[in-house]
Image (cartoon, rainbow, N blue to C red):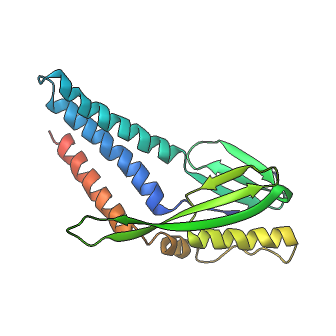
């Protein structure tokens, strides 16, 4: 895409934080379980292997987070952390839709917290489908506004003001879980490094 990018999405804070801090937390648990079992029986090796596999899975999920960039000539799906991009012409986009489902987080003895999980689907004329889970509801509305203006040729696209405020409002759900995960990861890291 050589022309000016008029819209760039930002990954949801919940997706970013849970994958990154989940990976770090599981890596710290791997280290902790490895230190504790040096002279124990061989069957206990399952714990560091399990924690290590979960850490790698969360790291891969973090690396595979995608963002959307929109320009007058095309739509680009790019990885957030690595320079891998796919660009498609705008005239090949058939449909962009978003569906939401609520994920219940909690246990029987406490109130459940519902976190909306959004899946944005971009369908192309050659029946290719790209699914993204990193766009929130407000980011999707902004993407659709810019997409319709570009495809219909109606008006100049003005970049939205208060982008940080829109991002925080879009990421409000699940913020308590993100803060809890940051506290747990930081506490475990400090405890391990102080030894």
Report x, y in % for residue 100: 54, 68
Could you tell me residue 110's position as x and y percent? 23, 70
Can residue 96 be spotted in the picture? Answer: yes
Which quadrant is the C terminus positioned in? top left
Q: Residue at x 39, y 70 (%)?
A: 114
Asked which quadrant contains residue 161, the reply is bottom right
Residue 128 to residue 178: above or below: above
Please state which of residues 19 and 107 is positioned toward the viewer in this rendering: 107
Using the image, determine if residue 180 lies above or below residue 163.
above
- Residue most extreme to the left: 39
> In the image, what residue occupies the spot 51% across and 72% down?
170
Left or right position of 121 against 158:
left
Q: Quadrant of residue 51?
A: top left
* Residue at the image point whose x is 81% and y is 73% from the top: 149
Residue 171, x across and y down, in percent:
47, 69
Q: How many marks?
A: 0
């Amino acid at each position: 895409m050589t022309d000016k990018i008029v819209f760039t999405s930002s990954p949801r804070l919940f997706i970013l934080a849970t994958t990154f801090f989940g990976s770090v937390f599981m890596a710290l648990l791997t280290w902790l379980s490895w230190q504790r079992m040096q002279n124990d029986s061989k069957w206990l090796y399952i714990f560091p292997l399990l924690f290590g596999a979960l850490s790698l899975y969360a790291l891969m999920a973090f690396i595979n987070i995608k963002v959307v960039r929109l320009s007058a000539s095309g739509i680009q799906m790019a990885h957030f952390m690595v320079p891998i991009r796919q660009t498609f012409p705008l005239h090949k986009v058939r449909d962009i839709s978003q569906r939401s489902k609520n994920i219940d987080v909690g246990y029987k003895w406490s109130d459940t917290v519902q976190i909306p999980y959004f899946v944005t689907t971009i369908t192309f004329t050659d029946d290719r489908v790209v699914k993204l889970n990193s766009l929130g509801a407000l980011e999707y509305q902004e993407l659709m506004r810019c997409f319709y203006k570009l495809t219909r040729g109606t008006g100049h696209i003005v970049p939205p003001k208060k982008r940080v405020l829109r991002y925080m409002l879009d990421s409000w759900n699940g913020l308590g879980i993100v803060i809890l995960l940051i506290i747990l990861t930081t506490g475990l890291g400090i405890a391990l490094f102080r030894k």
